[in-house]
Image (cartoon, helix red, strand yellow):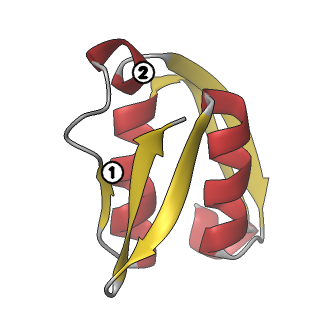
Amino acid sequence: LYWKTGVLNFENKPLQYIVAELGKMQKKEITLDASMPEAVKLQVITISFTRQPLEEMLTELCLVAKCRWAKHGNGYIISAQ
């Protein structure tokens, strides 16, 4: 319903799931760095976004997940801090 309401909620979802969903919704390649520990990829997160650009969503997600993102070609890569 994000396209209709502008609100995107993730409740108790693993980081890797949220990243995959954001990539699908925004039609951008967002990947988790291969060196990221499995525990970080699987950490459960609850987060909401309201009519925000992708980079702002990634910034908020990384604040919660204690990671960082960087632009990589036409997409983004998320790595551990």
Residue 39, picture quadrant: top left
Q: Position of residue 42 (x, y in %)?
A: 36, 18
Between residue 44 and residue 7, name the one nearer to us.
44
**On screen, residue 41 above or below 61:** above
Q: Residue at x 42, y 21 (%)?
A: 40
Residue 8 numbered mark, or none = none
Q: Residue at x 45, y 59 (%)?
A: 22
**On screen, residue 26 above or below 70:** below
| Amino acid at pointer 1 | Ala
Q: Find the residue positioned furthest to the bottom.
A: 74
Residue 40 numbered mark, or none = 2
Within 10 Å of disc 2 (Cα), the crowding (few <14, some 14-19, many 20+) is some
Q: Quadrant of the N terminus?
A: bottom right
Which of pointers 1 and 2 lies earlier in the amino acid sequence? 1
Q: Secondary structure at mark 1?
A: helix
Relative side of 57 to 76, left or right: right
| Amino acid at pointer 2 | Val
Q: Secondary structure at mark 2?
A: helix
Q: Residue at x 60, y 30 (%)?
A: 65
Q: Position of residue 76 (x, y in %)?
A: 40, 68
Residue 20 numbered mark, or none = 1
Q: Position of residue 81 (x, y in %)?
A: 55, 35
